[in-house]
Amino acid sequence: MNYPGRLLITPPPPGGRYGAFGGTYVPETVMPALVELADEARVAFADSEFLSELAELQRDYAGRPTPIYRAARLSAHAGTEVWLKREDLLHTGAHKLNNALGQLLLARRMGKRRIVAETGAGQHGLATATACALLGLPCVVFMGSEDMRRQAVNVAKMELLGARVEAVESGSRTLKDATSEAIRDWVTNVRDTHYVIGSAVGPHPYPWLVRTLQSVIGVEARQQMLEQAGSLPAVVVACVGGGSNAIGMFAGFLDDPMVRLVGVEAGGRGRAQGEHGASLSLGSPGVLHGANSFLLQDEDGQVAATHSISAGLDYPGVGPEHAMLRESGRAEYAIVDDVGALETFHLLSELEGIIPALESAHAIRWAVEHGPSEPGPILVCLSGRGDKDLDTVLAAGPPP
């Protein structure tokens, strides 16, 4: 496949709005930095030198294009043809590096000499620490102490790369709280600091910026399916926490109305409040971390606690473009619980010799459950590899 480092570059949505969702709900002190970022991104995405440098890093450093793979044994088990988009083979083991490399190049253009980031599963923190090491920028990663416990290997990797990992002890000590602390740091140091948001959430221009940088997944996958499978997929499936791998994957197929788009949220331990992370399926509109979208909240509008066995899906909100896609009906969103994700983690490992991230296992589970009723092919975004989750999986005990 000839790889020109293509992104799906579209104009930013007017006012940062995706229908009724999105926007910029931030303190006035941060507005100049957001305006600067939006302006710089528009210029950079029209600059052939910037795009060439990014494409070169994606190819020679990160390892793009990532392949698609027809999972023959999984297909036989599911009763339909299943293909996997192998983002787990990208350098650092997940799709997050697509976004980190692009945002770090933008930060360098803007003269920002300090980088902060948040992380849940550790993959965005690891990708940011990796890109900072490559470009020689200091890096601070905020991470909930509960996630640090669950993802100790990624914490060690980030520190090995020279990043400082700041433990967050407030709230549920997970991704929501890490994001809040990263924003506080950024607001305090906004003149010389760039905040690398890891998902398609937050105030404008972040949802548009992250979607653009992650669209390489969908652009590649669409061309690969036509070349290798001989057709577009009938269904495209991706897990959804904040929603970056899913929106990047969906971006390549939004203009193909015959392709069904399915996002899979974390069902956790059940439907009661605090037991899941299914913002689109079980939440309601509200403002979180600078944007209006769907979120999990109580009767008084307070952000609710969440749970998922996968740290990357343990978040009470979702990107505003996903909210718009849900409301318009262009994409649908389903729920897979902890038990199903764990079972599928073992299943893919045993059938295909591929150990998936627990986040990705949610999406693969949907394909397994719905395969008999789907004509196929089903294309699943395997957003990351599962070595980071081994401690969690071992603690859960042997598969049923």
Image (cartoon, rainbow, N blue to C red):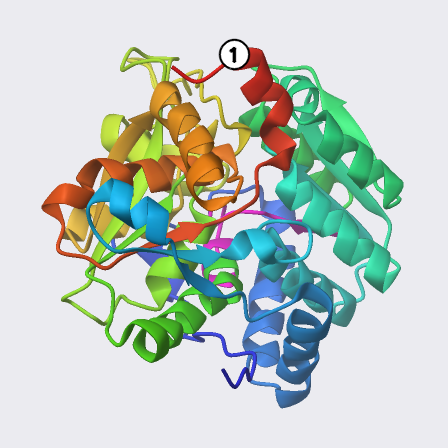
Q: Quadrant of residue 39?
A: bottom right
Q: Which residues lie in the magenta part?
A: 193-209
Quick check: 180 left or right of 164? left
Height in image: 227 above or below 215?
Answer: below
Quick check: 137 left or right of 226? right
Residue at the extreme bottom of the image, as rendered: 48
Residue at left offset 35%, top offset 75%? 228
> x, y percentage for residue 16?
40, 58
Q: Examine the rendering and report whether any part of residue 323 can be seen.
A: no
Task: Inspect the image, locate mark 1, and give the three-letter code of the amino acid beneath it.
Answer: Gly
Residue at left offset 43%, top offset 59%? 248
Quick check: 330 left or right of 121? left
> x, y percentage for residue 274?
39, 13
Residue at left offset 18%, top offset 40%? 370
Residue at left offset 33%, top offset 60%? 250
- Which sits in the foreground, 105 or 27? 105
Quick check: 246 left or right of 148? left
The residue indicated by pointer 1 is: 397
Looking at the rendered structure, the secondary structure element under dot 1 is: loop
Magenta-drawn stretch contains 197:
yes
Q: Quadrant of residue 77?
A: top left
Height in image: 47 above or below 154?
Answer: below
Q: Quadrant of residue 131?
A: bottom right
Magenta-drawn stretch contains 195:
yes
